[in-house]
Image: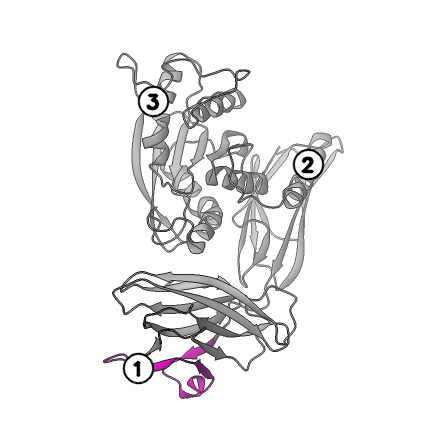
Amino acid sequence: MKQLLYSIFAILIFCQIGYSQSNIKMAPHGFDIVREDISKGKIDSVTYNSKIVGVNRRALIYTPPGYSEKTKYPVLYLLHGIGGDEKEWYKGGQPQVILDNLYAEGKLQPMIVVLPNGRAMKDDRATGNIFDKEKVEAFATFEKDLLNDLIPYVEKKYSVLKDREHRAIAGLSMGGGQSLNFGLGNLDQFAWVGGFSSAPNTKKPEELETLRSEMLDELEALENGPVALMSCSVPEGKLKRNTTLKYKLYTSADNQIAISPAVKFKRDGNLTEFEFTPSPGCFSLRVNITSPDGRKTTLKREYFVKEKDNQSYELFRWSDNIFQRRMRLDHVTTWQVPGSPVHGFTFPANTDFPGVLFKGTNDTSMYRWVKVKLENPMTIPVNLIMKYHARNGKAQDGQGISLKPGERKSVIYPLNPEGKTKDEAFNMIQFWMWKKDMERKLIIESVSLYSERPDSE
């Protein structure tokens, strides 16, 4: 796998750059040119069900020449840049051509290459403003989609090797940042990680160093003790209540196993499987493996189960007059949308900072996200600013929002980070527009706060 990935990483990167420094060896001429006299691999367009996103998602999968269900293959997950989708590498980098040529020259071990769409959201097309906050956040969401939905799909539908030593992740630009985040953050899943001109969407260096150090501690234990590898259906971190964790532990059948907290487990040769549903709060899992000669290895996993599921607070909605009384208008008038309880807002021309503010009376320190449903009833674009206010008088400009003519959409943005007190937490949301020489209209259907990130619908 090592030689395989060194070769493919080195070759693929040359198809995405236009020049090279003189001390860097260029790829050989013709490496990405189709040759008619060789065997060809196959590109499949597949659809898999994403429970994380809630829709069926697409990916391209390359299988090598002579692919056979009787052979188990390593897998490379190759991620695209911020402006692309599952077809970006296929159209712009021609990995299928490069791979075919390398196989023909005997320079590459046969493998499967998965080209996913790394923008994990319901509308994952690379259209409109690709730097929109919701679209950028979808690249982070892809981590769960990859681990929980795509990899299991590939391993079910294709004849692949399922251990970390035969699974790699690499990407270009935004995909390079994803690869570093996901790969270094899940070294129990990926043994090989590559980033090409990685975008600055990576985690902070100290975060990656912590991940690396923790993994090195485990690898050091494995070097001195019996070999063992453990995977889980859910990565370390925060869990929802009643989440069942399913573990697979691979170690020699001759080794003894002790699990804390104590759970029932099933052993079948080198494979040990167990699962449990932890109680709310912090807890640590410890798996101790002891070889016949007394050497020991301890594998550790840390979790935190939330006391409560996602909670929401309707800051404003038109169907409730109580909420409407907490609405403050600054140089703005309202009008009723025909056939609907919803009203629209008119922002007058030549007025300084016309706006509308919604005030909440609850303690909002627990709410991390704000979700707003908006509509532009006009035939021209509308731009507005969403601003946050707290009880202690502090204010913060939240986000700039742009709506196309006639566009209706939901927007989701971060609100209160952990650790804020009731007085420090933002409990008021204001929408205002810059002064212009024309009247503008806007429909705000609802404003809701959430303790966890809500769905986009």
Percent coordinates x, y for residue 361 in the rendering: 54, 82
| Residue 38 percent location from the top left of the image | 30, 14
Secondary element under disc 3, as helix, strand or loop, is helix
Count residues near mark 2 (Cα–Cα under 10 Å), then give few for <14, some for 14-19, many for 20+.
Answer: few
Kindly identify which residue carries mark 1: 335
Question: Amino acid type of disc 3?
Answer: Val
Q: Is residue 453 visible?
A: no
Question: What amino acid does circle 1 point to?
Answer: Trp
Of discs 1 and 2, which sits in the foreground? Answer: 1
Residue at x 46%, y 34% (from the top left corner): 172
Pointer 3 or 1: first along the chain: 3
Q: Which mark is residue 97?
A: 3
- The residue beneath circle 2 is 216
Give how far apart the Cα atoms at labels 1 and 2 are.
62 Å
Q: Is residue 9 visible?
A: yes
Seen in the image, is 216 located left or right of residue 245? right
Using the numbered discs, state the Cα–Cα distance from disc 3 to disc 1 in whole angstroms: 60 Å
